[in-house]
Structures are given as structure tokens and as C-alpha cells.
Image: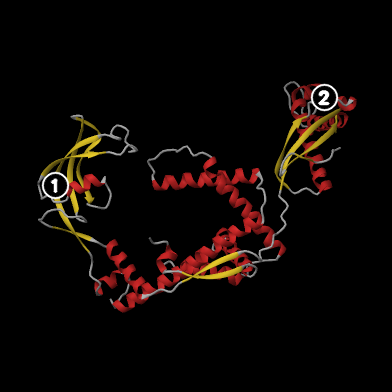
Amino acid sequence: MQSNVENLGALERRIEISISQDQIQGEVDKRLKELAKKTKMHGFRPGKVPFKLVSQKYGVQVQQEAVGDALQHEFAEAVKKYDLQVVGYPSYEVKQDSSDKESSTELIFNAKFEVFPQITLGDLGQINVEKPITEVGSGDVDKTIEMIRKQHMQYQTVNRAVTEGDRVKIDYRGMLDGKSFEGGQASDIFLVVGKGQYMQDFEDALVGMYLDEEKSFEVTFPDDYHGKDVAGRTVTFSVKLKSVELPVLPEVNNDFAQLLGIVDGDVDKMRDAIRYDLEREVVRQIKSKIKTQVMRCLIDVNPIDAPNVLVNQEIARLMESARKDLAIRNPNAGEMQLKPDLFKEKAEHRIKLGLILAELMTVHRLKATPGQVRSVIEEAAQAYDNPEEVIRWHYSSEERLKDAESLALEENVVQWVLGQVNVIEKPVTFDELMGIA
């Protein structure tokens, strides 16, 4: 028997469940009799152990199992009766405050649980979504080539005074109040002057030095410096310059083009290939920015609460992913203590969005066709040297295919939403689109 459903919060519910003790005892006796037929005990033949001894040994365990099964049955009946969309599993607790005279013949429990939020899809007609518009120009190709040249920069030894941009090798020793301090000395350190690897005053002091020159100078550390021993204090550094190297950029010629994968070294082909890659990146960035706006507007127009059960599961998943990522980035970092609160906001956002997307797909029957899934896989494969091999790799795994299907479904959602909102085209430069300052 169940009472009405009580609302304890936005999604939390409670139902009182009462179970007849006579019913439980009957079930316990039945199970113990069945168990007695199989029980083996020293001094008795199999199946001939007295019922009393079987009850003494297994009675508590069997009663717990019988009560648990009865609770699950009664809860399932309540879910069906009240048409509840339950998230996760209920928690049961014995009700302590019952004063019903008949309660002595019944076991009374409270079942607490969460339900999925009811989602009524809102109107998107008043929502504006900006669509960035840009074209890749020759200047953008030139900037990209310069960036690639810097990535392939080499250094050439020179015999002159240090200037900003040079790479130098130095030994240094810092003294605080006439004494050495931890982390204040090093040998054979390479740094690019002016790049900000060290404090600006330190790097500025290197400008004008010559090979094998030794120099002393003072540097005052900021108050918020991470090293507490020197924060806000003045340190005297002694530096010896051991080498000076001039940065040399590769020339844009046939060798450079071949370095970028143009077999015959044709510079014009190289520029065309770079333009093609930039245009693909423009398309990707535009789609990404539109998708971000679409997902945000879906949450804004469809405000819902996220079930704590699902949020906690997502927090656990995000934390585990973060731990693995940290282990890959820094294998020597050890086990880092991550706080769940750091992931709560992101987890809530993901759960809410997932529930809204699922409702949208159901109501408007949005499905991913095999052709759309194939397009998603082929697009991802273009970033690799052997696209056909990557495509076969995706199709060899059911899990990877589901990931591709999810992306195709999300694209269908985006296209459906764009048909409901006001799309405003906004011309932007290539740098603005890419977030280049």
C-alpha cells in the first residue's frame, strides 16, 4: 500500500510504503523452507537440517531480502500507478513518526527519489543568433605563413651584444640579504630575451651583454610572486653569458614548401593548400560559434532543473576525465585532489542540455541518417594523412559510430533551431573569428 506522492523539492519526491509483517513473515517462512531443502550442516544429512536451525542461521538475511524485494515491488507499483519518470534508484528509510495503531502489524517506509523534469519546449521565434561571415584573403595566408616560419625558427651563433629576441645561454645565482635561497641559481639555462620566460627586469638586464661577460644587478619581485621567500623583496643576481644566438626564419622557397608537404616544392601550391586549410577552419569555427549560441538559447528558453543523481554522475565522469588528462600531461604529478564543486556548474549545464535535446529530438522526430553519420566521419577523417583508414577505424567500433551519430543528431538540432530563430549575419575579420588579438 502506498500513500500519495509528496513533493520535497523541484524534483525530489517521497512515497510512504507499508508492508504487512504477516506477509513478510509468510514469505520468510517460505524461503527458509526452500533453503532447508538445500542446506548442509554438520551432523545432519543434506535437506534434513531442522527448520529451527536453518531459521537461526539464515533468518535475518532472508528477512532482509524479503523486505527488500517487497519494497522494490511496492515501489514499482507506485511508479506505475502515479506514472512517475524516476531517475536512478530510491532510498528507503523506516518511518519513525507513525502513531497508527495498526502500524504494529506493518512495516512502514519512506521512499525518497528524484524524477525527470517536465519539459515544455519554449518559443524560439524571438531569439537572435549571429552567424559570422568572413572570407580568407591573401593577407591571412601571409600571416599563417609567418606563423609557420616562426614555428620552424632556428638559431645561429653570433659574436655581438645581446638584443631582444636573441636566445642566450646563462648561468645565474641570486642572493637574498647576502645568502643563497632555494631556486635562486641555475646553470646552462636557455631563454629568449624579451619573451617573458623570466621577470622583465631580469631579461632587460641581459640586453647589451657580451659573450663570457659577467654582470650583477638587482631585481625586485612583485608582492604576489608565487615564491613566498622572495615575494616583495629585492634579490641581487650574478649572471654569466655563455652564448648568444640570433633567431633565423626559414625562407619561403621550394624547400619550405616541401617541408609543408608540397612534393614538388611549388610555393603557389603551398599557398593554395594553406588557403584551403584556412577556409576549412573558417567553416568549422562558424559552425562551432553558431552551435554554442544555439545550445545556450535552448537552455535559456527551456529553463529546467537538473536531477542531482545525474549531475553527481556527470561530476564523477568529469573528475575521472580530468584525472586522466592530468596524468597524461604530467605523469609525475601524483594523485591530485580534485574538488567536485569545480565541476558542478559544467555538469549541470550538460545534464540540462542533454535532457532538452532528447525532448526536442523526440517531439520533432529528429534522427540522424546513415548518410549524415558518414559525412561526420568523413569530415573528421580529412584532418589525417590517411582518411580512408580513419573512416574504416570509425566503422569498426559501435561506440565510435554512436559518437558520430550523436554529432550528426546535434547538427540536425542546430539546423532545426536555425529554422525557428532569427539568424543575423555579422561580417567579421579572419582574426576576429579565430580569436586572434
On the rendered structure, is 378 left or right of 305? Answer: left
Residue 376 x, y percent position in the rendering: 54, 67
Q: Residue at x 59, y 51 (%)?
A: 349
Q: Residue at x 71, y 49 (%)?
A: 116
Q: Nearer the viewer, residue 87 or 203?
A: 203
Residue 72 x, y percent position in the rendering: 77, 39
Q: Residue at x 12, y 53 (%)?
A: 161
Q: Quadrant of the N terminus?
A: top right
- Determine whether 223 is above or below 345 in the image: above
Residue at mark 2 to residue at mark 1: CA–CA distance: 93 Å
Look at mark 2 in the image and give the residue it sits on. 51
Residue 316 x, y percent position in the rendering: 56, 43
Q: Residues within 10 Å of mark 1 (few under 14, many from 20)?
A: many
Q: Is residue 297 visible?
A: yes
Element type where label 2 sits in the image: helix
- State if disc 1 and disc 2 touch (CB < 8 Å): no
Q: Earlier in the sequence, mark 2 or mark 1?
A: 2
- Determine whether 280 is above or below 198 in the image: below
Q: Is residue 385 visible?
A: no
Identify the amino acid type marked 2. Phe
Look at mark 1 in the image and give the residue it sits on. 241
On the rendered structure, is 310 left or right of 81? Answer: left
Residue 136 x, y percent position in the rendering: 41, 73
Identify the amino acid type marked 1. Leu
